[in-house]
């Protein structure tokens, strides 16, 4: 029996943060009274017609640029026909064979396409369980109906649940930094489906896939994919066949259930939406999207690593742009990049300090003009009151106790005050040396260098 | 007939503007006639003249307007001739109706129609057939049968209709009045309950070409921001004055003016061509080689779009809902079973089939290609001719019930009008005489946005023909 490898493609729905809906002037919202953000268009009333939101196209182009897609000069909308109460027109306006963006890549995963569409209404099942089965009735809230969505479809380049989670984290951060979406999974502004199949390691074909629907957290996605991979592997090892179907993963029970089989799959009867003219992308639209593009996390991580940061630190600063921005603002002064980044990564207060002051402070610590502990004290003061770190060090007398002359009597006093410790040290048990160091730190209010104190103790005891 | 009713809409607007007659007096004169209608032309008639009518300074100064049922009118029943929308009162008004109201038109009545504009005899209305005012045993044509009959019978000075494959021109012809299907996109579709979105176009019905031009002038103009397929009109619509057709080249497509056209209709058509020559036009045969395939393409494309457009009538949000259904799918199917008539169901089935996976290319795809070919045929002909002219319909008004059992013979009514619909070009039907006491229509079509020239030529012909349409208004 061969070993199997998972082949995974992802489909991500992203709610765009435009002011108004995809095809009408209703403002977007979350958590408003049901059915207060509606109009004839998003309610699908007879005679109402859609008009494309230019802001959605703009954001779609930005996403396309971020994932290095080919941006279509002309693209069209199609109708995807299906009956369900969450779809007031009984069709979703989506894109089919002429999407906004084709191809591309983000990180280690190729992009198949990126297209625009509209979100459905929200069904609320009234009854004990809150789920459709066993509910007494279902009611519809159309506030979400018509919210602009971008659907991003990857090529089947993902090989593990962990890779899926990592890649989705990169995608989410990319979208967040693009400023095109709130990317909030709990609120449903980012949703993910996974297409999963297995194949024997070393082969290149594609096995029969299943589609795992609508997982609403990265953790569930990882667990769901793992559960489905295990399920498929067990079937294949038993000599069985995978059935193409759409599945639901219940994160509470870890169970996977079938939503519909291939035979039950809808025929959506796609055809070009006659109520909308084709989207013609002008050079002005491309320029506007390009001008709005920030540096994206993957590129920034690479650039920061080029400045001499470790890969982990570069990644952290790129994925937390507020840290990255503070880092870059403080850079160029006399602080070494990695040390500066470490302060930002480890000290919460560092973000509240003027970049130049932070750089000065880090530089002082690096040159051992003050100790790390003293540096933290200065940092707290800078964060609370601002000011010049050098002036604070001078005013508070926090300069490091540098010379042996100054430290020597204090170390002597420490050893004298703790004769039992001194004995143990002489006996070769170095564990309690912290007591002496602590004594010196207390006496110097943290201005002494721990290394220097240790060295001095050893010298004095002839160790 | 009262003097007020005898006034053309343009004349009435002039008198209203000059303060010679009052808007409420005129409205009441029509309202009384409409309320006493015996043709079943209306599905709703205003209860009283609007208390706060339009100013005399507006261009239409309060001339009443009848509006096809499928235009949404806020708070007023808008049922598109269908039982599934019985009692539906929209919360908004169609852009074109709003625009006309802003120009001073007042809403007199909603007119009966074939259900969702599907039909050529008005016998597909859930609210009963409309009778032809020239002969009440005959159909008025469809789908805008109520609008045509109302204008012909003097129950309204003019009316709005919609034309998808001939639904303005055919009933105008059968009722002896003027009907214009404008260039696709020149009038907003926002608020028009859709049949086939890529073909539906609103247009005017009137007693004469001048009124037609006046009403159309206030239907078009700028593009409607609520309809991304609307373009408005590149030029202002003029009231026509031409009396001659010197230098005008009329092309008579062989494919649409011979076989299948009734002899009485052909006779009036040929007489009209002779009159056009007398006015200085040249008349020559031309060819629209793909026109014979127009009906086949149309009866795939229109039902395909309709099957999607009509899917929203599911009983969830408005209109009727079948009671007592046990589950969602039963509620859908029973509602649609009860709510739609036979012709609508037929077209939904045809359209659903044509769009189905595995059939799309063969049906919908091929039909789209034919549509392009037909459009190209017209472009070709308009390189050498100013207008294409045909009889509007193969026959005069037929008897009620004569074709209801035979959908194909009913569809053939659109034989001469569908090609222009597929090409999206403007076409007008004007009355050109009687055959056995029933009106015959003459169709004149021009290139996209040539409405001013179409109206001008139609006006010159109208003067030469001198058709007397007063009989059914008596």
Image (tube, rainbow, N blue to C red):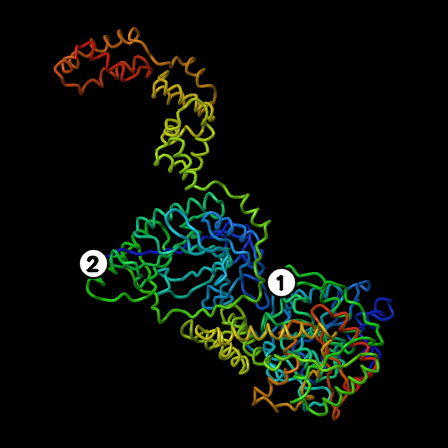
Q: Which mark is residue B227?
A: 1
What chain letter is assigned to the residue under label 2?
A
Q: Do the residues under discs 2 and 1 have CB atoms within 8 angstroms?
A: no
Q: Residues within 10 Å of mark 2 (few under 14, many from 20)?
A: few
Q: Give SS at disc 1.
A: loop
Question: At 42% across and 36% down in the image, what residue appears?
Answer: A303
Q: Give the alpha-carbon distance from disc 2 to disc 1, as whole Å.
A: 59 Å
Which residue is denoted by mark 2 in the rendering?
A2
Position of A33 relative to B153 (above/below): above
Q: Residues within 10 Å of mark 1 (few under 14, many from 20)?
A: many
Position of B248 relative to B128 (above/below): above
Residue B372: give x, y in percent of width and height: 59, 72
Q: Are marks 2 and 1 on the same chain?
A: no
Q: Give residue A226's quadrant in the image.
A: bottom left
Please name whichever residue, A300 or B405, is drawn nearer the observer in this view of the structure.
A300
Position of A308 relative to B452 (above/below): above
């Amino acid at each position: 029996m061969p070993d199997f490898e998972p082949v995974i493609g992802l489909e991500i729905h992203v709610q765009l943060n435009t002011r108004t809906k995809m095809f009408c002037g209703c403002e977007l919202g979350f958590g408003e009274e049901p059915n207060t953000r509606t109009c004839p268009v998003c309610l699908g009333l007879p005679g109402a017609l859609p008009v494309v939101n230019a802001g959605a196209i703009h954001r779609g182009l930005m996403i396309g640029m971020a994932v290095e897609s080919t941006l279509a000069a002309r693209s069209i909308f199609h109708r995807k026909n299906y009956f369900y109460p969450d779809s007031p027109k009984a069709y979703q306006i989506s894109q089919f064979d002429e999407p906004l963006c084709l191809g591309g890549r983000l990180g280690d995963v190729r992009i198949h396409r990126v297209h625009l569409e509209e979100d459905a209404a929200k069904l609320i099942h009234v009854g004990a369980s809150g789920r459709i089965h066993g509910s007494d009735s279902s009611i519809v809230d159309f506030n979400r109906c018509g919210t602009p969505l971008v659907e991003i479809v990857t090529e089947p380049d993902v090989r593990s649940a962990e890779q899926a989670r990592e890649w989705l984290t990169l995608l989410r951060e990319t979208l967040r930094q693009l400023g095109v979406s709130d990317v909030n999974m709990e609120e449903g502004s980012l949703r993910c489906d996974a297409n999963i199949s297995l194949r024997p390691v070393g082969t290149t074909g594609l096995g029969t896939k299943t589609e795992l629907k609508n997982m609403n957290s990265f953790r569930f996605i990882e667990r769901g994919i793992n559960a489905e991979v295990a399920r498929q592997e067990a079937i294949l090892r038993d000599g069985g066949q995978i059935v193409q179907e759409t599945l639901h993963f219940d994160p509470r029970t870890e169970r996977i259930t079938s939503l519909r089989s291939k035979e039950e799959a809808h025929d959506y009867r796609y055809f070009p939406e006659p109520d909308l003219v084709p989207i013609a992308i002008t050079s002005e639209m491309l320029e506007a999207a390009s001008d709005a593009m920030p540096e994206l996390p993957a590129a920034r991580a690479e650039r920061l690593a080029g400045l001499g940061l470790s890969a982990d630190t570069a990644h952290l600063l790129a994925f937390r742009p507020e840290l990255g921005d503070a880092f870059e603002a403080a850079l160029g002064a006399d602080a070494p990049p990695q040390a500066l980044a470490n302060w930002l990564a480890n000290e919460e207060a560092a973000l509240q300090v003027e970049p130049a002051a932070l750089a000065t402070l880090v530089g002082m610590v690096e040159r051992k003009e003050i100790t790390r502990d003293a540096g933290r004290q200065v940092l707290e003061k800078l964060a609370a009151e601002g000011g010049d770190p050098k002036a604070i060090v001078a005013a508070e007398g926090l300069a490091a106790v540098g010379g042996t002359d100054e430290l020597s009597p204090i170390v002597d006093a420490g050893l004298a005050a703790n004769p039992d410790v001194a004995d143990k040290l002489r006996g070769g048990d170095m564990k309690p040396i912290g007591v002496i160091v602590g004594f010196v730190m207390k006496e110097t209010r943290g201005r002494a260098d721990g290394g220097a104190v240790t060295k001095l103790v050893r010298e004095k005891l002839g160790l | 007939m009262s003097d007020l009713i005898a006034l053309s809409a343009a004349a009435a607007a002039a008198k209203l503007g000059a303060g010679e007659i009052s808007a409420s007096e005129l409205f009441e004169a029509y309202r009384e006639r409409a309320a006493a209608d015996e043709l079943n032309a209306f599905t709703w008639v205003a209860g009283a003249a609007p208390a706060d009518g339009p100013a005399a300074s507006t261009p239409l100064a309060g001339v009443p307007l009848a509006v096809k049922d499928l235009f949404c009118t806020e708070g007023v029943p808008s049922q598109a001739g269908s039982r599934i929308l019985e009692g539906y009162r929209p919360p908004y008004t169609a852009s074109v109706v709003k625009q006309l109201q802003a120009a001073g038109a007042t809403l007199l009545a909603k007119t009966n129609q074939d259900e969702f504009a599907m039909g050529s005899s008005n016998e597909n209305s859930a609210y009963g057939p409309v009778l032809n005012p020239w002969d009440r045993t005959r159909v008025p044509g469809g789908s805008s049968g109520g609008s045509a009959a109302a204008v012909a019978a003097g129950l309204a000075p003019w009316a709005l209709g919609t034309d998808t494959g001939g639904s303005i021109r055919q009933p105008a012809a059968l009722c002896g009045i003027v009907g214009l299907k404008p260039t696709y996109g020149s009038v907003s579709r926002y608020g028009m309950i859709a049949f086939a979105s890529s073909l539906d176009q609103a247009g005017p019905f009137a007693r004469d070409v001048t009124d037609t031009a006046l009403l159309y002038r206030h239907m078009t103009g700028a593009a409607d921001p609520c309809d991304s397929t609307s373009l408005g009109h590149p030029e202002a619509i003029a009231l026509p004055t031409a009396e001659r057709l010197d230098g005008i080249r009329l092309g008579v497509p062989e494919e649409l003016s011979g076989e299948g056209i009734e002899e009485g209709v052909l006779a009036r058509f040929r007489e009209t061509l002779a009159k056009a020559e007398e006015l200085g036009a040249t008349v020559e045969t031309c060819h629209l080689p793909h026109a014979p395939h127009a009906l086949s393409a149309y009866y795939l494309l229109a039902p395909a779009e309709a099957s999607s457009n009509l899917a929203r009538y599911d009983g969830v949000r408005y209109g009727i809902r079948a009671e007592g259904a046990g589950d969602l799918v039963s509620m859908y199917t029973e509602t649609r079973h009860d709510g739609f008539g036979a012709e609508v169901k037929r077209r939904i089935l045809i359209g659903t089939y044509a769009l189905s996976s595995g059939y799309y290319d063969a049906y919908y795809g091929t039909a789209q290609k034919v549509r392009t070919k037909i459009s190209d045929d017209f472009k070709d002909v308009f390189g050498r001719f100013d207008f294409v002219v045909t009889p509007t319909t193969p026959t005069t008004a037929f008897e009620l019930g004569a074709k209801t059992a035979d959908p194909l013979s009913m569809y053939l009514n659109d034989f001469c009008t569908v090609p222009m619909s597929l090409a999206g070009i403007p076409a007008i039907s004007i009355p050109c005489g009687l055959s056995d006491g029933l009106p015959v229509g003459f169709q004149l079509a021009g290139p996209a946005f040539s409405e001013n020239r179409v109206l001008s030529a139609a006006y010159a012909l109208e003067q030469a023909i001198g058709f007397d349409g007063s009989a059914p208004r008596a």
